[in-house]
Amino acid sequence: MHKIEDLKIWQKSMKLTKLVYNAVANLPSNEKYGLISQIKRSSISIPSNITEGAGRNSNKEFKYFLGVANGSSYKLQTQLTLTIG
């Protein structure tokens, strides 16, 4: 198991999530339950999956969850690209 607070990837993903939340606060409210909601969920998914993997019992499981987190980062990238055109 890994100490989550010491993992730079987790620290950076937490900063990213906070930045995303601040950025979407300025988007039109008509997107509140559409794209904004999806963006928030994708950003939260990144540190959440890193945390889940860190709590697992093997490096193989940890790597799996890092892969899931990476997939969420690609999803977030697409959603942000759609938002800013």
Image (cartoon, rainbow, N blue to C red):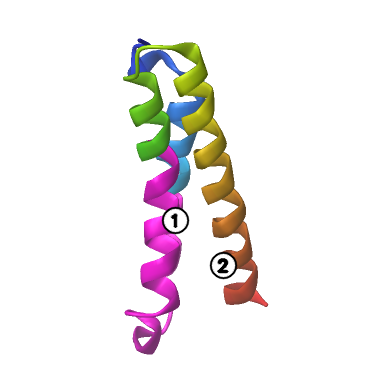
Other-residue count near label 1 (Cα within 10 Å), few / some / many at <14 / 14–19 / ≥20: many
- Image vertical order of residue 35 relative to residue 19, above or below: below
Residue 45 visible here: yes
Given residues 53 and 43, the one toward you in this image is: 53
Residue that appears at 36% across and 89% down? 30
- Image vertical order of residue 41 relative to residue 50, above or below: below
Q: Determine whether the residue tagged by mark 1 lies in a helix, strand or loop.
A: helix
Amino acid type indicated by mark 1: Ser
Residue that appears at 58% across and 41% down? 70
User: Which quadrant is the C terminus positioned in?
Assistant: bottom right
Query: Which residue carries the number 2 mark?
Result: 79
Magenta stretch: give its range: 19-47
Query: Which residue carries the number 1 mark?
Result: 42
Q: Which mark is residue 25?
A: none
Q: Is residue 24 magenta?
A: yes
Residue that appears at 43% across and 28% down? 11
Picture quadrant where residue 83 is located? bottom right
Picture quadrant where residue 75 is located? bottom right
Q: Is residue 1 magenta?
A: no
Residue that appears at 38% across and 60% down? 40
Q: Magenta part mainly helix, strand or loop?
A: helix
User: Which quadrant is the N terminus positioned in?
Assistant: top left
Give the CA distance from mark 1 to mark 2: 9 Å
Are the two marked residues, 1 and 2, in contact with CB atoms closer than 8 angstroms? yes
Picture quadrant where residue 22 is located? bottom left
